[in-house]
Amino acid sequence: MWESESESADGRDYGNSVLTSSKHGVKTDGFELRGKSWYVDTDIPSDLQVQVGDVYFHLHKYPLLSRSGKVNRILYESRNPELNKIVLDELPGGSDAFELAAKFCYGIAVDLTAANISGLRCAAEYLEMTEDLEEGNLIFKTEAFLSYVVLSSWRDSIAVLKSCEKLSPWAENLQIVRRCSESIAWKACANPKGIRWAYTGKPPKDSSPKWNDMDSSPSRNQQVPPDWWFEDVSLLRIDHFVRVVTAIKVKGMKFELIGAAIMHYAAKWLPGLISDAAGAGDEGISNGRNINTGSISSSWRGGLHMIVAGTKDELSTVQAKDQRMIIESLISIIPPQKDSVSCSFLLRLLRMANMLKVAPALVTELEKRVGMQFEQATLADLLIPSYGKSETMYDVDLVQRLLEHFLVQEQMESSSPSRQSFSDKHMYEGSHRVANPNAKMRVARLVDSYLTEVSRDRDLSLTKFQVLAEALPESARTCDDGLYRAIDSYLKAHPMLSEHERKRLCRLMDCQKLSIDACMHAAQNERLPLRVVVQVLFSEQLKISNTIANSSLKEAGECYYQPLLSNRKSLLEGTPQSFQEGWTAAKKDINTLKFELDSVKTKYNGLQNDMENLQRQFDKLVKQKQTSAWSSGWKKLSKFTKMTGLENQNSGPQLNPAEQPRKTPRRWRNSIS
C-alpha cells in the first residue's frame, strides 16, 4: 500500500485532522447518548429536535443557523418561529455524519479520518455549510483534508473510495469517486522505486485483509511485485473497480497486468468461477506472475461472496442481479488485446453469463473473444450446460459458434494480414499473432474430444453431431482416430439408428487416416456398417503394401513384413465368426462384380468399333458432291453388274435362267446397303 514518509504502523498523524469551530453560542462539554437520542451536555435547554433516520438530536437553533444554510431555509420557509422539530432523512452519511457536523457547529473537536471524511463532506454539502455563512466552514475544511491528506495516500484513497459506496449520488457529484480513482490509478502505474511501500498483499488463510498489516510489506530494498495493487483494488465495489481500471488504462499500463487484475477481482467476487478448478485461473497470467486466487477466495468474507456452481434456481433474485452486473462490467473492461486474459477464464465467464442471462450483445462479444484464443481451450471448460436452451445436456450450438468465430479469425489472419483495419489491429498489440496451422490441429483434437463426450447424450441429434464434425476443414485432421472414437461412442449411445443413418455418420471419417490400432478395432466393431469395415480392411492392406514397397533394404522389408503378417493373422483370428462369413460373401460379390465389369467392357469395345465403321462409311457418302445420291447409286450398280458378269464367266458353269434374276437383285441390295 502506498504510504508517505509521515505514516507509521500505528496510524497516521494528520496534524490538522482535528476540526474545531472558533465561534459558538452554547458552551458545552460534549454530546451524550441516551438510547437513540443525543443530548448536548449544557445547562441551556434544547429548543430544536432534529430527526435523522431513527436517531434524534436535541440541539439548539443558534449554532445550527450560524453554520447551515439548509437549516436556515427550513426554518424560514416554515413561517413558524416556534418550530422545534425538523426531519433530515435524506442527509447523506446518516446519523453518524450529522453527529460530526453538529459537533462542529458547537465547536467540539472532530477527528477527521479516511473512514468518515467522505460522509462528512457529503453531509456538509447537503447542509449547505459554505463560506458565505462563516469563514472556515465545514465544506472548506473537509475539502482541504480530501485534497491534501487523503489523495496523497494510497491506503486512504482506497478507504475513502470504499466508503463512497453508500453515498451515491453525492460522492459522484462532488467528484470524490473520480479523484480517488485517478489517485489510485496514478500510484498503481508509478515507478515503485524510492517509495515506502505498505500494501496489503496476500491475506492470511484464516483472516480478512487488514489495512495496517505491515508484516507483509517489503522493505525499501526488496523487489516490489507488479501485482502489488491487485488485492487492495479488488476490495472495491464493481462500479468503482471499473472506474479505477478505466483510469489505469488511460495511464498506459500493460494489458497483461490489467487482465490479471480483472481475473483476480473475479476470483474474489465470483468464487463459483473457480470452484471446479481452484488454480485454473492462474495459468493464464503471463510473465511469471503467480496469483493464488484459490486462497484469496477462501479467505474473503465480504461483499458478494457466493457460490454459483449450482443450478440457477438456487440463486436468489438479488444475488443473481448482483452477479449479472459484475459479469457484464468485467466483460466491458477486458482489454481487447489477445491473451490479456486466459481462454479458460473467458469460457468460465461465458458459462456464468449464459446461466445468469447476461445481455446478448455482451455474450456475443465474449464468444468472439473466446474464438480468438480457442486453441487454448480445454475440454472441461467447453462442457457448458445448455441451461434449458435446448434438449441436449450440453450447449452444442455454443461450441459450434465458438468454432465458427475461430475459423473466421484464422481465415482473416491467413488471407489478408497486411490489410487489417486499425480497429482490428489494435486487438493484437503486443501479440502479433500469425496464422498457425498447428492451431487448427489442436482445435480438431479438442472438437473430437468434445464430440466423444457429448455423443453419450441420447438427445443429441445426428444433424448437430454431423455439423460440428464437418465444421473443420479436412486438412485440420491428420489422424481420424479421435473422430472414430466419437462416432463409435455415438453409435453405442444410439443403437436405434437405421442403416442409412449409420452409413451417413461413418462418412464423416476417412478410413485412410486411421492408425493401425484404430483399424484393428474397427475391423472387430459390429456397430459399423459392413461396407465401412471392408473399407477399413482395404485401407489397412494398402498401408501394408505401401510400407513394403517403400522399404529400401530387403532385410528391413522382410523383418517389417513379418510382424505385419502376424498382426493380419491375429486380426483374422480375433474376428467374430459372423463377420468372417460376411467377409467371404463379400469377396464372392466382389469377384462377380469384377467379371460382369469385364464383360461390359468387352461389349462396349465391340460397339465402339461398329460405330467407327459406320462413321467412316457415312463420311465417304458425304464427300461425293458432284452427283446426286440416285445417280451415284446407279453407277455403282452398273459397275457392280459388269464385274459380276465377268466373275460368272470365269468361274465355271452358267447358272439357270430362273436363278439369275434372284441373285442379281440380292447383290444389288447388298451393294446399296
Image (cartoon, rainbow, N blue to C red):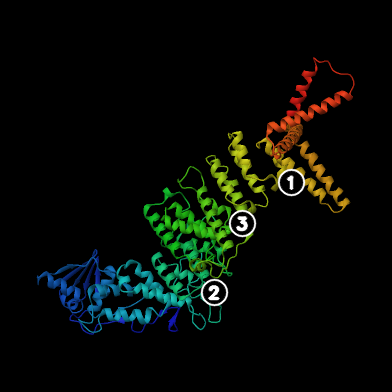
**Mark 3 lies on residue:** 440
**Quadrant of image for the C terminus:** top right
Closer to the camera in the image, 665 or 258:
665
Real-space CA distance between mark 1 and mark 2, rounded to the nearest whole angstrom: 52 Å
Give residue 175's position: percent from left, percent from top.
33, 74
Report if the CB atoms under discs 1 and 2 are less than 8 Å apart.
no
Question: Does residue 279 appear anywhere in the picture?
Answer: no
From the viewer's perspective, is 423 left or right of 611? left
Front: mark 2 or 3: 3
Amino acid tagged 1 = Ile
Q: Please name which of the two marks, 1 or 2, marks the residue nearer to the observer.
A: 1
Q: Tell which circle, 2 or 3, labels the residue nearer the N-terminal end.
A: 2
Residue 131: image location, x then y, percent: 23, 82
Local packing at callout 2 (Cα closer than 10 Å; few below 14, some 14-19, many 20+) is: few
Q: In terms of sequence position, does the residue under pointer 1 or pointer 2 come before the other? A: 2
The kind of residue tagged 3 is Lys
Q: Is 408 above or below relative to 135? A: above
Could you say whether the residue bearing mark 1 is in a helix, strand or loop?
helix
Task: Compare marks 1 and 3 and give the one earlier in the sequence.
Answer: 3
Residue type marked 2: Pro
Residue occupying image coordinates x 56% and y 48%: 468
**Vertical relation: 310 (above or below) 23:** above
Residue 355 vertical position relative to residue 587 in the rendered view, above or below: below
Q: Distance between the residues labelled 2 and 3?
A: 36 Å
Of helix, strand and loop, which one carries label 3? helix
In this orientation, which residue lies closer to the viewer: 666 or 55? Answer: 666
Give the number of the disc on residue 225.
Answer: 2
Q: Are marks 2 and 3 in contact (CB under 8 Å)?
A: no
Distance between mark 1 and mark 3 Cα atoms: 24 Å
Q: Is residue 406 visible?
A: yes
- Residue of label 1: 516
- On residue 499, the disc is none
